[in-house]
Amino acid sequence: MVLQKHRNDLWPHHIAKQAAPAVSNPMFQVGQPFANHEQTRSMLVERVARATRYYKQAEQKYRRAQARAHENETTKMLADQAKRKAFFAKREMFSALKRLEVFESQTTQ
């Protein structure tokens, strides 16, 4: 019960902390969809790079786990977990690529 109260006390602080950058970011100002084109583009490119790197790491972990999956139930479970992580990493990578593609097409019009 004490722990729950403590968590509830922290919750608004976390929300405010997460919301602060979006509010102060010039990209989110009303009436200016792309206030700073280069900043937005570099942010999207960075996101694609991060997602790609994460996907490659997850895929590598999945291949290693798959090689050991036949040993016992735990290694099989870990291989399934790695497969899921690789799938979501791949989805995130394609999502980031699509966002960059849409941004580029909107700014070139």
Image: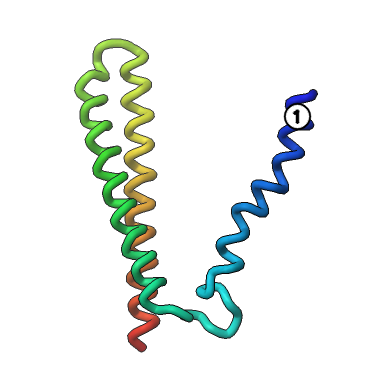
The foreground one among 16 and 50 is: 16
Q: In this figure, which residue is indicated by the disc labeled 1?
A: 4
Quarter of the rendering containing residue 95: bottom left
Its colouring scheme is rainbow
**Which is nearer the eye, 5 or 75?**
5
Residue 32 locus on image (x, y percent)? 53, 83
Q: Quadrant of the C terminus?
A: bottom left
Task: Identify the residue at image location x=37%, y=65%.
Answer: 44
- Callout 1: SS: helix
Out of 90 and 14, give the one closest to the viewer: 14
Residue at 33% across, 54% down: 93
Q: State the image coordinates of residue 30 (x, y, percent, origin top left).
A: 60, 80
Residue at the image point whose x is 37% and y is 60% from the top: 96
Is residue 35 depicted above or below 70 in this figure? below
Residue 89 at x, y = what percent? 35, 45
Residue 96 against residue 67 in the figure, above or below: below
Q: Locate residue 81 relative to residue 64 in the image: left or right.
A: right
In the image as oriented, which residue stretches furthest toward the top?
Answer: 72
Residue 106 x, y percent position in the rendering: 39, 81
Side of 63 relative to 10 (left or right): left
| Amino acid at the residue labelled 1 | Gln
Q: Residue furthest bottom?
A: 109
Residue in the image at 33% along x and 85% along y: 108
Q: Is residue 7 above or below residue 100?
A: above
**How many labels sit on residues?**
1
- Is the residue marked by circle 1 packed among few (<14), some (14-19), or many (20+) residues within 10 Å? few
Q: Is residue 9 above or below residue 93?
A: above
Specify whether 84 is left or right of 16: left
